[in-house]
Image (cartoon, rainbow, N blue to C red):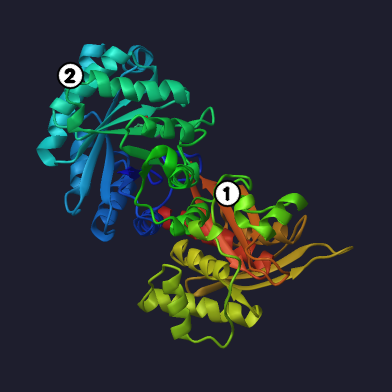
Amino acid sequence: MRLIKIFDTTLRDGEQSPGASMNVQEKVTVAKQLARLGVDIIEAGFAFSSPGDFEAIKTIGNEVEGPVICSLARAREEDIKAAWEALKDAPKKRIHTFHSTSDIHLKYQFRVTREEALKRSVEMVSLARSFIDDVEFSPMDATRTDIEYLCEIVEAVIEAGASTVNIPDTVGYSIPSEFGAMIKAIHEKVGNIDKAVIAVHCHNDLGLSTANSLAAVLNDAGQIECTINGIGERAGNCSMEEVVMALRTRRDVFNADTKINTEEIMRSSRLVTKITGISVQPNKAIVGSNAFAHESGIHQDGLLKEKSTYEIIRPESVGLYSAKLVLGKHSGRHAFKTRLKELGYSLEGDELNEVFERFKKLADQKKEIFDEDIEALISEGVAKAPEIYSLVDLYIVSGVNQKPTAAIKLRAGDEVLDKLEYGDGPVDATYKAIASVTNTKSKLLKFEVKGITGGTDALGEVVVSLEEDGGTARGHGADTDIIVAAAKAYINALNKLEARKKQ
Ligand code: KIV
Ligand code: ZN
């Protein structure tokens, strides 16, 4: 049984999804979950691209144990040096450098010849090797690159010291038979291929990224690059949960597996959804809300008789359990901490106190607290921003034949500001009151509300996205009252925008 390495690029390519950018704290939270999930390599960002990415890579390198931490770098000296600076204290590190190789890219985008691209790639791999032993090289747009030239450049970068060569289907153009044949040809034509691992990095423009990655495994690729929920540039990347579960479920076909702890899949998926604000479609394989829901009578009948009639994966094996009553109003701090631990969160000190306080408040409002509620409380904590504004009070009037009205009180430093506004509905009135009291010039880009668990006393979770002067900020709020949740989410996003201005 071959072990395929999982290279997770949620924090780099995944972050390139429109609206998915994450701050340092959010990236560290995701990275810690990726470590629990058992990925082999975390591509934590692109160090040269921004100070935020640089800091995130550095912090993840220092704080996250287990996986190799990697930074992307163009085939440029300044990029490779920045990647090294960000990574140098990490115990396990990799630099991933890349250069386009297709004639389309070389001619129209980079205006360099094939020879120049090869020379630069070799030089930059050598430079990276002068800092670090673990260097990965990607010939970008490989699937539209002439195969003879592709093999030539792959051989040259391995000679220069690359220990992984990644074959990206950058524009998601390939199909499984063709992509598998390309990986096979690289094995056959590249003389020193035994000195490197072949990785694949497939985009999903034709919906084929998982199929292409699996075709590569059938042709001896040793590393798959993927993201949680398949997020990424345009139509996204190969989705981690799909490719991992395909390998695990069909070991008979692939004779290969990964080290992934599959029971962490659902938690990873939910965390990435919460942090990025990008929801998963209900019918998405493995992590969609309908992925294990059997609707038809015939299917239900079969399942009741024998699960294997219609179930190829046990829901528990991906960490999906039916909502379990965990705690209530009388549960103490110890029970709460123990449950957090079972859920994979080890909070201590102030962080634990804050979440416990929120739990107690929730337990006063809601009789039964489920795992999903606890995760919502934690993600509120993850989304925390400096409290420039905080909600003191909110009074709402709404109903049939009522003029929707919101009276809000916010604390800003030592002052308490208040305002009353009317709107098209209670949320609109609340948002107008908050906008007016804070004098914000930001624009609301996105407003999403969902119930965390079933029942009329369920926690409602609101995610908003604001834009101001070209910068965006996401806000989260959870409460049993969805208008309060909406107000909290708006204030959370405003606090992030204000904090950024102060910086
Ligand atoms: O899609 C792509 O080609 C990439 C490279 C940087 C590997 O993301
Ligand atoms: Zn990519």
Q: Measured along the vertical axis of the image, is residue 99 above or below residue 261? A: above
Q: Nearer the viewer, residue 399 or 244?
A: 244
Ligand 1 shown in quarter: top left
Residue at image location 42% in from the left, 33% down from the top: 213
Q: What is the crowding at mark 2: few (fewer than 14 residues within 10 Å), some, or many (at least 20)?
A: some
Residue in view at x 17 percent, y 49 percent: 88
Give the residue at mark 1.
279
Would you name the residue on which mark 2 appears? Answer: 119
Q: Position of residue 68 (x, y in %)?
A: 25, 49
Name which residue type carries label 1: Ser
Which residue corresponds to the image point at 50% horizontal and 39% vertical from the top-left?
A: 18
Beta carbon of the mark 1 residue lies under 8 A of ligand 2: no
Quarter of the image where the N terminus is located: top left
Check the image and report above or below for 140 versus 257.
above
Residue 428 can be seen in this image: yes
The one of 431 and 83 positioned closer to us in this rendering? 83
